[in-house]
Structure formats: C-alpha cells, structure tokens
Image (spheres, coloured by chain):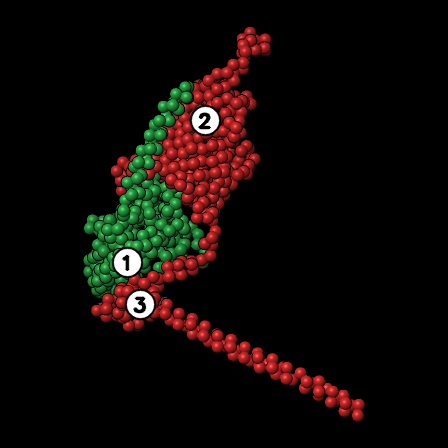
C-alpha cells in the first residue's frame, strides 16, 4: 500500500479543513450577542426574558425530550463549543451536559468557569431525600426534586441566578438585565394572580401523576399528589402497584391523572378507565405541546388543563 | 508565745496575698463582663441577621399569593410553610426585593457532605459460554481459554472527577478471568485531560483506550454486543488498543460537528504493534463527524489511522472507517433502531520464514520480508421496538463479521443474533448465539481440537453500581 502518496493527498485536504474552520470561526466569535446555551427549553425561555436582545439562546434538549436522560449527541457539543454561557438546571437533572462540555473543548463554560450557571443555586428544593439513598429507590434524585421550573414562583430565584451569570460575561449590561428581569417578574406576578385564582376552587384536590415531577407546581397551587403511576422514579410499574393505585384512587376519589409526553399513555389510560379518572396531558417544558412556546404560555397551558379537568 | 507567733504568721501569710488576689478577681470580673457584653452584641447581631433572613424568605415565598385574593385561596407550599406560617398576612412586595441577590450558595452548601469527592462507579460484566468440545480443546471460541465456562470478564472500579478548574482525571482498575479460574487484576486506564488549552484543544495523557474506530474506546460492559467483533479481536487483540501516551483533540468551530485527534503512544499492543519505544512511536489520528437527519435520526461517521512498528521492527499501518446510525422517534427514551459498522484495513510488513520444499527439515528458500494487506469488517444492529411499558425493556440485535487474519493466511465469517433484557438502566442481561466458520483449520487446532466451524451460546449479565457517566452517541 503506497502510504506516502496517501499522506501527500490527505495533507492538503487536512490543511484546507483547518484553515476553513478557522475562517468560519471568525464571524462566530465576532458576533456581538452573548451566546447562551441552556440544557432545557424552560431555561432558554427565562434567559431570553432576562437577556432580551443582548443574548442569543439555544437549548440542548427539545421540549418534547425527557431531560433526565438525553443522548449525548456530538451536535450538542457544537452548540456548547460556541457558548459564552452555559445555564444548567442543576439538581442532577442534566448531568449528561457534563459529558457534552467535556467533548466540546470550550473552557469558558467548564466546571467552575465564569460562564457556568447553576440555575437551581439558592432555591428552596423540595423532596430532598433523608437518610440513605440508593438505586433500590429507582432513579431517585439524591439532592432533591429538580423540576422547580414548573413553579412560576421560582422565577425570581432562577432569573436572579441568570442575571448573575450574564453579568459575569457582560458586566456593562447588568442594568439592562436587571430591567428586563423586573419587567418579566412583573408579568409573572400578574399571571400568578390569575392562575392562583383559577385553581383556588380546587385547593386540596388530589391528583395522580405518571412521573414524580409536578410537586412544585402542585404545591404552589395548593393541590396534592395522591400517588404516582411509576412505583419508583424511572421504573415501570408492577401489576400489584397498579392494583394498589387503582384502589387508592377509587378510595380517595381521584379524578385526574397528570401525564407527560414521554410517559406510558397506555397504562395511564388503563388506570383512568378502571377508576373513571381523566388523563390530562401537561406540558413538562416550554415547547412540549402546542401553544407552549414561552414560559408564561407553558404555565398557562398547565393551569388551564388542570382547571378544566377538575371542573 | 510560740503558738501566738505561729498564728500571727499564718494570719499574716493569709492576709498578705489578699490585695493581689483581689486585683485578679476584679480583673476577671471585668473580663467576664466584657465577654458578656461582646456575647450580647454578637447575639443581637445574629438575631437581627436571622430575623432579616427570615423576613426575606417570608417575603419571597409569600410573593406568589395574590394580594387581592383571600389568604386561604393561596396556600403556601408545604415546604415553604416551615419558613412562612400559613396564617401570615399577605405582604405587599417591593419589586426591588425580588431583584435582590439571594445568597445563591447558602442552601447549596447544605446539600450534604462529599462535595469535594470524585465519582466512584463499579461495573460488573459476567459471561457464560457453551460450545463444542473440539472448540474447547482448541481454545478457539470467542473467549479463548474460557470455553464452556461462566466467568467474570470485566469487574471494573472507576474513579473519575475534576482535578482542578483546568483538568479532570479518570482511573480504572479491572479484574477478569483470563484463563480458567485465573483472575487478573490490572490497571485498565489512568489518564488526565487538560481541558482549558488554547483554540479549543484538549490534551489527554496517560494510559487509555485509544480512540481508534467506534468500539475500541468503549469499555466491554458498555459495548452493544456480548463478544467483540472478530475484526477487532484479530487486528487489535482481545484487550483492544490500550496504550500509554497522549492524545490531542480539537473540535472545529464549524456549524456541524467535526473532531480531529492526533496521538503519540508507546506502541505496546502486541497484536498490532509491540515495539513499545517512543523512538518509533505509535502515531494515531482520527476524524469524526456527525449529522442530524431531522429530529429523529442521526448518523456519525469516523475515519482512524494508527501507524507504528511491530516487535520485529516492521511498519504496520491500520486504517479504520466506521459509521453509526440511530433512529429514535419523538417521545421515545431509547432508540428504536441502531445500526453500526466498522472496517479495518491493514498494511503490514512481516518476516516470512523460508520454506522446506523437499521435506528434509531444512528451509530451501530464504527468509523474506512480505507485505500483508488484510482487512475485515462487521455490521451490527439492534431493535428496541416498544416505546414504554414492560416490553420496552426488551431488545433484539445481530452482528455479521467477516475478516481476514492479519498475518497468517485465511479468513473467517460469523453471524450472531441476540436478545437483551434491561430491567433498569443499570442492569442488563443478554442471550445470544454465534456461528463462526473459518476458511481452514490452520491456527485453530491446539491440543488436538479443531475449530473450523464453531457454534456458541453466549450469555451476559452486566450491572452498574454508583456513578456512571452518560454514554455518548
């Protein structure tokens, strides 16, 4: 095999490739907007609300994808490669993003770098397990339930973390971020008044969920979780668990099962049929259902869906 | 008189130190008073700080309650209730309070000990193998020397984490049965990666599984098949390409993924190289790219090269080409279909001993140097056809192998279907069958056995304990 001619052929090609890549890189780095990558679409919406025209945001997970276990595709590394700021959900929901960062070769957003934001920092975390935590409990989150973004009451804390992160990258724009944040929080506050009033008649009502991710939402609006179709997080239910759940739902007159797009609809429907309950597909993230393109729209969708089902 | 003097002396002795003791008592009293004052000041300070924080928490957590709604209409969250009693009156919030920083790390720091610890994981991979007795005698099954046995192939202890803001490290120890009943414990990998180098490059150095092709960098318990593809076992050896040296990677700043890698290693792998000196190092390279084909499917393509010297000081060059495709319908948590394949082409100089043409035991032709241009490939696939429920835990797959031998003459092909059951993300069982057919018996006739045609039933049980990083595509 003539290896030398092969090397001679490949060398100019490789050189061209490297030069081309370098030239392509220039406009990307010269862009004036702050390139932000978030792990979830909820965080993307919140960063856009705070950053306004000063940021360009991309999310690693789509709204319809389960953010617990995202496949680490190299295309995600391309996004992180260009990022000035990486905003993560934290609480071990998006640990897969560490593998993305490791493959991206972008030290600006590495662990401990100024371009890294843990949006959960400082939040009051619910369902923090007490005592020993192991996998016999299923795919449990050892530092607490990570689905805080479904509670609009968490928006002040999350956006405060985002502002801090953006201001580290662009300190001169902090006043603009603060202004945007306050304007956004005022909208959240207004909407929250409406949502609270809408769900007020159902205070204390019990619902069943297919995956344990609604605790923040339910607690915020005074609803309660009677049980879960998943016996343990991430583990499909056993027949005996379903039998117990059906009995419990009948006993406690639970009329609603909240489901997510990646849940097992067939099981939810079966349980609903046995108990006379209604399966209510909710939007677990921005962009996960029609009409949930923004953060407020997503919460609005969930509040309306639950209120209609409970009427 | 004597006793009077003694009494006087005693009284005098007792009275004499009085002024000094009184002074000490006085100063201690003052000191105590001062400390008491300091304590009171600190106590006041802490109480004020606690009250301030409590008020802030109360304000922030009560904030969602609409001012217009009656208190009962907006119950505080259960967890919040600890900090803010439900009877607390609604508070009018100044928007500036919402914007105030919230000591972001105060609660995070309370999330338990071990924040500075690295991750620890254990993976166990057990194999069961049943085959014909002639294959067993010849040690010519997919797991040579372990035919008709159930054995631990790889029990791995992995330690990995961040060294400092600029580097991370990974150390893996492995134990597994090499020959009947013999457990070998060894250092499988130990390397550090510098992650903050200029131009988006990363440098990995130490002992590592080389990023040559698709499966070589993947640990055996994570591979999509029970046994290794024949082409990899023949050209890279049973352990694969595990080398000591350094790899520099670079992800091009392009709109699509393109990763380039170049590495320099000792070249210790005895199957393919084996000279093992940096004076004639093993040099590796790889280009990898990836394309999304819509939201549901994607393909990864790679090309690798490894060039080094064999123990006979002959040049050996391996070229590898690989592809992997996955189809994951929207809303599925696992791929419905995965297809993957690799091809290895070898250009290697070898010593060929002179031949004894007249049967007198003496070679009649001189030793010669020859070039061996050999190649092989495999194609595999897996289907996991159910989206949710109990059946979603099942998968079925196959692999077809065809390969020449790198040095000796001949070739072999094999086909192997399998069934997999995954009770959870951390536990997996596989049962498979493999049929191998070789062009001739040469090289597979040890101990009077013969293994031109091989039937094998393979079983695999794999578990993961503790931390395990997410799998790349």
Residue at 37%, 26% in the rendered image: A11
Proximity of marks 3 and 2: CB atoms separated by less than 8 Å: no
Q: How many marks?
A: 3
Residue B17, percent from left and from top: 67, 83
Is B324 situated above or below A143?
above
Residue B207, percent from left and from top: 50, 37
Which shade is chain B? red
Return the residue nearer the eye: A224 or B172: B172
Return the residue nearer the eye: A39 or B378: A39
Circle number at residue B59: 3
Label 1: which residue?
A175
Residue at 48%, 74% in the rendered image: B39
Return the residue nearer the eye: B423 or A180: A180
Q: Quadrant of the C terminus of chain A?
A: bottom left
- How far is mark 3 from mark 2, CA to CA? 67 Å
Residue at 59%, 10% in the rendered image: B362
Classify mark 2: helix, strand or loop.
strand
Q: Are marks 1 and 3 on the same chain?
A: no
Classify mark 3: helix, strand or loop.
helix
Q: Is residue A287 left or right of residue B262?
A: left
Report the chain shown in green.
Answer: A
- How far is mark 1 from mark 2, CA to CA? 57 Å
Label 2: which residue?
B307
Mark 1 chain: A
């Amino acid at each position: 095999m003539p290896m030398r001619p092969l090397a001679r052929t490949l060398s100019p090609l490789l050189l061209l490739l490297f030069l081309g890549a370098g030239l392509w890189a220039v406009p990307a780095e010269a862009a004036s907007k702050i390139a932000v990558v978030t792990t979830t679409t909820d965080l993307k919406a919140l960063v856009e609300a705070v950053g306004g025209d000063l940021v360009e945001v991309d999310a690693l997970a789509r709204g319809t994808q389960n953010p617990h276990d995202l496949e680490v595709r190299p295309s995600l590394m391309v996004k992180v490669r260009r990022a000035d700021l990486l905003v993560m959900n934290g609480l071990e929901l998006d640990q897969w993003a560490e593998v993305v960062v490791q493959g991206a070769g972008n030290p600006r957003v590495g662990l401990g770098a100024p371009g890294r934001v843990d949006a959960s920092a400082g939040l009051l975390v619910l369902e923090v397990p007490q005592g020993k935590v192991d996998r016999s409990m299923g795919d449990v989150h050892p530092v607490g339930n990570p689905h805080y973004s479904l509670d609009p009451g968490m928006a002040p804390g999350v956006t405060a973390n985002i502002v801090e992160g953006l201001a580290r990258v662009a300190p001169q724009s902090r006043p603009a971020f603060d202004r945007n944040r306050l304007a956004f929080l005022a909208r959240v506050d207004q909407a929250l008044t409406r949502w609270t009033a809408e769900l007020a008649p159902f205070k204390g009502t019990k619902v069943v969920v297919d995956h344990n991710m609604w605790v923040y939402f339910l607690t915020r609006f005074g609803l309660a979780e009677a049980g879960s179709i998943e016996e343990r997080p991430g583990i499909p239910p056993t027949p005996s668990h379903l039998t117990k759940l059906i009995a419990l739902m009948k006993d406690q007159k639970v009329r609603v099962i909240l489901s997510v797009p990646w849940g097992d609809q067939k099981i939810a429907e079966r349980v609903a049929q046995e108990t006379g309950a209604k399966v209510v597909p909710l939007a677990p993230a921005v962009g996960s259902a029609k009409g949930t393109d923004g953060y407020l729209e997503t919460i609005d969708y969930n509040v309306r869906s639950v209120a209609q089902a409970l009427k | 008189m004597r006793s009077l003097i003694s009494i006087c002396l005693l009284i005098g002795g007792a009275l004499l130190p009085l002024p000094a003791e009184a002074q000490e008592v006085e100063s201690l009293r003052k000191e105590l008073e001062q400390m008491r004052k300091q304590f009171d000041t600190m106590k006041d300070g802490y109480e004020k700080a606690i009250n301030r924080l409590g008020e802030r928490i109360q304000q922030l957590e009560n904030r969602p309650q609409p001012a217009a709604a009656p208190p009962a209409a907006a119950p505080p969250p259960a967890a919040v209730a600890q900090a803010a009693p439900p009877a607390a009156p609604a508070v009018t919030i100044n928007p500036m309070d919402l914007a105030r920083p919230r000591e972001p790390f105060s609660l995070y720091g309370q999330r338990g000990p071990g924040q500075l610890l690295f991750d620890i994981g254990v993976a166990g991979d057990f194999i069961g193998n049943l085959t014909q007795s002639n294959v067993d005698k010849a040690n010519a099954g997919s797991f040579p020397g372990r035919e008709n046995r159930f054995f631990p192939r790889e029990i791995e202890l992995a330690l990995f984490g961040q060294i400092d803001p600029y580097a991370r490290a990974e150390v893996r120890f492995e134990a597994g049965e090499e020959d009947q009943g013999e457990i070998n414990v060894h250092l499988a990998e130990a390397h550090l990666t510098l992650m903050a180098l200029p131009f988006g490059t990363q440098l990995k150095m130490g002992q590592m599984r080389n990023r040559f092709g698709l499966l070589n960098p993947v640990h055996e318990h994570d591979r999509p098949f029970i046994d290794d593809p024949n082409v990899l076992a023949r050209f890279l050896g049973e352990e694969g390409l595990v080398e000591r040296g350094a790899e520099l990677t670079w992800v091009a700043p392009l709109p699509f993924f393109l990763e380039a890698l170049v590495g320099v290693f000792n070249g210790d792998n005895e199957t393919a190289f084996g000279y093992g000196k940096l004076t004639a190092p093993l040099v590796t390279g790889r280009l990898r790219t990836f394309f999304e084909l819509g939201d549901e499917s994607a393909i990864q393509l790679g090309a690798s090269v490894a060039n080094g010297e064999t123990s006979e000081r002959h040049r050996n060059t391996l070229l590898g080409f690989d592809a992997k495709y996955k189809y994951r319908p929207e809303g599925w948590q696992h791929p419905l279909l995965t297809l993957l394949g690799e091809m290895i082409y070898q250009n290697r100089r070898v010593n060929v001993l002179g031949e004894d043409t007249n049967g007198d035991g003496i070679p009649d032709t001189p030793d010669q140097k020859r070039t061996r241009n050999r190649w092989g490939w495999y194609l595999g696939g897996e289907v996991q056809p159910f989206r949710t429920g109990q059946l979603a835990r099942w998968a079925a797959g196959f692999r077809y192998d065809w390969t020449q031998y790198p040095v000796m003459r001949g070739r072999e092909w094999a086909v192997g279907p399998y069934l997999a059951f995954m009770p959870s993300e951390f536990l997996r069982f596989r049962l498979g069958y493999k049929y191998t057919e070789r062009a001739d018996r040469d090289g597979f006739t040890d101990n009077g056995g013969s293994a031109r045609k091989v039937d094998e039933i393979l079983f695999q049980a794999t578990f993961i304990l503790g931390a395990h990083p997410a799998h790349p595509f």
